[in-house]
Amino acid sequence: MSDFPASWQFRSPKARLALWFGWLCLVALFVWCWQVMNERTIWMFVQDAPKQAADIGGRMWPPRWSYLGELMVPLWDTLNMATLGTLLGVILAVPVAFMAARNTSPFPLILRPIALFIIVASRSINSLIWALLLVAILGPGLLAGIIAIGLRSIGFIGKLLYEGIEETDIRQVEAITATGASQAQVLNYAIVPQILPAFWGITVFRWDINIRESAILGLVGAGGLGLKLQNSLNTLAWPQVTLILLVILATVVLSEWVSAKVRAAII
């Protein structure tokens, strides 16, 4: 028997072998993806891209400031689309969140899987896809954009809200239950007060995100600034494109500032 103790190793031989195998698989995946991309890429266009980008950039400057007056109504439509879509998403997401949470779902074996499926489905489909489907069903206009924003918001609000519901302090629930309160009273006096700050924070945060998304939904016919952007791109009116992008940037920055202030005041 050796007098020297066995040296400590960070990983066992099997763990090191598994790590190296994982890295080998990752490198192989990267090489395969590079080959697929290389086969489907026309490198002549890529080499010419800097020249084309410089040419378009020269046409985009200076912005056409006289076009600003025509953007006020689409900007207002974009803000309304984001606000009403967020409100619709909140109305639909709140009951879904309570059904998805383990501690509030009335029938966990039935309603909880359904609620989780709704949340996953909403988060899996981008708002542009929702808008494309709704424009095909309802026709172009703000209504399709509002519903698309609302359907997309269900997954975001519902997931964060049901996680907040599950993290509520059980001691407050037990204290209210011990008084002989009904299930509705427990919900109203023990759970809702705990999640209310998170609820408002999530809502404002989602409204901020929806302003960014609603600004481009017009590209598929949902109205707002995106529609003006699509028309300017189709007519190669590059100075107008620059102005629209600046308006979108200013709107997003302002909404981010408002969102941060509101969340700081609430939380």
Image: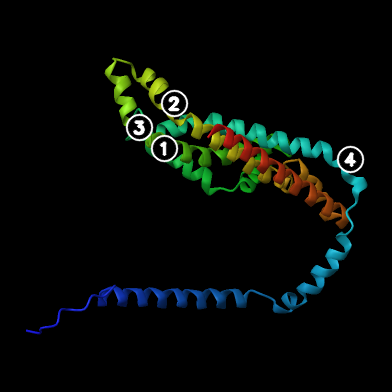
Q: Is residue 95 left or right of residue 266?
A: left
Amino acid found under the numbered disc labelled 2: Val
Residue 44 image offset from top left, x and y in percent: 74, 79
Query: Of the numbered discs in the image, which one, if any, rests on residue 169?
Result: 3
User: Which residue type does callout 4 highlight?
Assistant: Gly
Dot 3 and dot 2 residues touching (CB under 8 Å)? no
Residue sitting at x 49%, y 29% = 196
Q: Nearer the viewer, mark 3 or mark 2?
A: 3
Disc 3 or disc 4, which is closer to the eye? 3
Q: What's the residue type where badge 3 is placed?
A: Asp
**In screen coordinates, is 68 left or right of 245?**
right
Q: Do the residues bearing badges 2 and 1 touch, measured as CB atoms within 8 Å?
A: no
Label 4 – label 1 distance at C-alpha: 47 Å
Horizontal placement of 9 versus 211: left or right? left
Disc 4 crowd, CA 10 A, few/some/many (<14, 14-19, 20+): few
Of the numbered discs 3 and 1, the one sitting upstream in the chain is: 1
The image position of residue 214, as x and y in percent, is: 69, 42
Name the residue that disc number 2 marks.
192
Give the spatial CA distance, label 3 vs label 2.
Answer: 11 Å
- Quadrant that contains the N terminus: bottom left
Judge depth for marks 3 and 1 and give the one in front: 3
Answer left or right for 24 relative to 149.
Answer: left
Percent of width and height locating residue 89 = 57, 34
> Splitting the image into 4 quarters, where does residue 79 fall?
top right
Q: Is residue 136 visible?
A: no
Comes first in the chain, label 4 or label 1? 4
| Residue drawn where x is 46% and y is 33% of the image | 96
Q: Which residue is mark 4?
A: 69
Q: Can residue 265 be seen in this snapshot?
A: yes
Which residue is more in the foreground, 32 or 89? 89
Q: Nearer the viewer, mark 4 or mark 1?
A: 4
Q: How many residues crowd mark 1 within 10 Å: few (<14), some (14–19), many (20+)?
A: some
